[in-house]
Image (cartoon, rainbow, N blue to C red):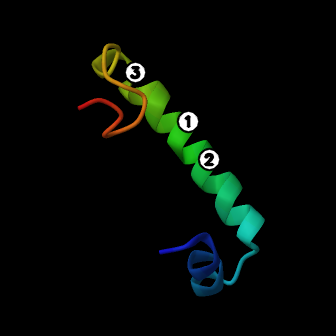
Amino acid sequence: LSYREIADALGIEMGTVMSRLSRAREKLREALGPYLANAPRRAGSQP
């Protein structure tokens, strides 16, 4: 889903969707950090 589609479905502003997803991604990075220490930052960034 796009940010706009999520915002429309939840009845919130698109900026709110973007900020919440950004915070959620950061929390995942922090929680999974020890397990992903040597992994590339983005999926598919290496062959």
Q: Residues within 10 Å of mark 1 (few under 14, many from 20)?
A: few
Q: Which residue is mark 1?
A: 26
Residue 45 or residue 39, whichever sits in front: 45
**In front here: 43 or 18?**
43
Secondary structure under the numbered disc 3 in the rendered image:
helix
Disc 3 from disc 1: Cα separation: 10 Å
Q: Left or right: 8 with respect to 41? A: right
Q: Residue furthest left?
A: 47
Q: Can you identify the residue that label 3 sits on? A: 33
How far is mark 1 from mark 2, CA to CA? Answer: 6 Å
Q: Residue 39 versus residue 30: which sits nearer the camera?
A: 39
Question: Which residue type does callout 2 highlight?
Answer: Ser
**What residue sits right under mark 2 in the picture?**
22
Residue at the spot x=68%, y=84% of the render?
11
Residue 24 place in picture, x, y as percent: 54, 46
Disc number placed over residue 8 in the picture, else none = none
Residue sitting at 47 percent across and 75 percent down?
1
Classify residue 18 as left or right of residue 9.
right
* Tag 1 secondary structure: helix
The relative height of residue 5 versus residue 21 in the rendered view (above or below) is below
Tell me which amino acid carries mark 3. Answer: Gly
Asked whether the beta carbons under mark 2 and mark 3 sit within 8 Å of each other, the answer is: no
Q: Where residue 39 sits: x, y (%)?
A: 31, 22
Q: CA distance from mark 2 to mark 3?
A: 16 Å
Q: Which residue lies at the image location 45% right of the left edge and 37% below the top edge?
A: 28
